[in-house]
Amino acid sequence: AKLRSSLNRLGRKDWIVHCCKRYEHGKGVAIYLARYVRGGPFSRQQLICAEAGRVRFRYQSHRTGQQEVANLPVETFIQRWLMHVPLPGKASIRYLGLYSSAARNRLNQARELLGQMPVTAGQLLQWQDYLAGIGRPACCEICGAPLYQQASLEKEVPRQTA
């Protein structure tokens, strides 16, 4: 009875399972994990040269699918590299297979076969809803006039110079 109760309780939970091929021995697991610990967003093989305050390197373009060359000031290169370093205490997770964002249709087909609800794209949080969620009114605390959005700040991304 206790086992059945536990199984019923666990069966009602939403499970997200990440499965990989089984490794025959611990060495394979260590090699797999070492790639993530040691790898990072840039490999030594990509570096062409670093001189005169500039870094020249190869990269795979997501737009063209081709290998291209960039020539950046050292500061810009370091800034871009640091954009890929996870914040302390935050995990860096990459999803492949059904859990990649490109495979959402296949994931939803699999979920349908298992009688589960489809995964939907997250909704952007509006600033008014954010303020309400933290208990702050969407009006001026001094005069009571409603707040209006006048401009949006875009995330600053350094421009690439080839």
Image (cartoon, rainbow, N blue to C red):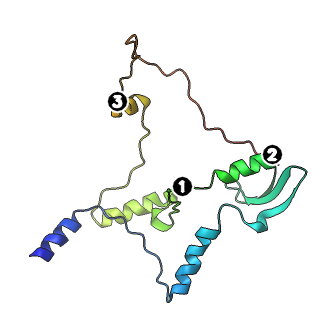
Q: Are marks 3 and 2 in contact (CB under 8 Å)?
A: no
Residue wearing tag 2: 161
Q: Position of residue 156 (x, y in %)?
A: 65, 38
Say if 98 sits above or below 25 in the image: above
> Could you tell which of marks 3 and 2 lies nearer the N-terminus?
3
Q: Is residue 57 visible?
A: yes
Residue 6: name its quadrant: bottom left
Instruction: Between label 1 and label 3, give the one nearer the viewer.
Output: 1
What amino acid is at disc 2?
Thr
State the residue lying farthest toward the top.
143
Residue at 77% x, 46% y is 75
Quadrant for the N terminus, please: bottom left
- Dot 2: what SS? loop
CA distance for labels 3 and 2? 42 Å
What amino acid is at disc 3?
Ala
Residue wearing tag 3: 132
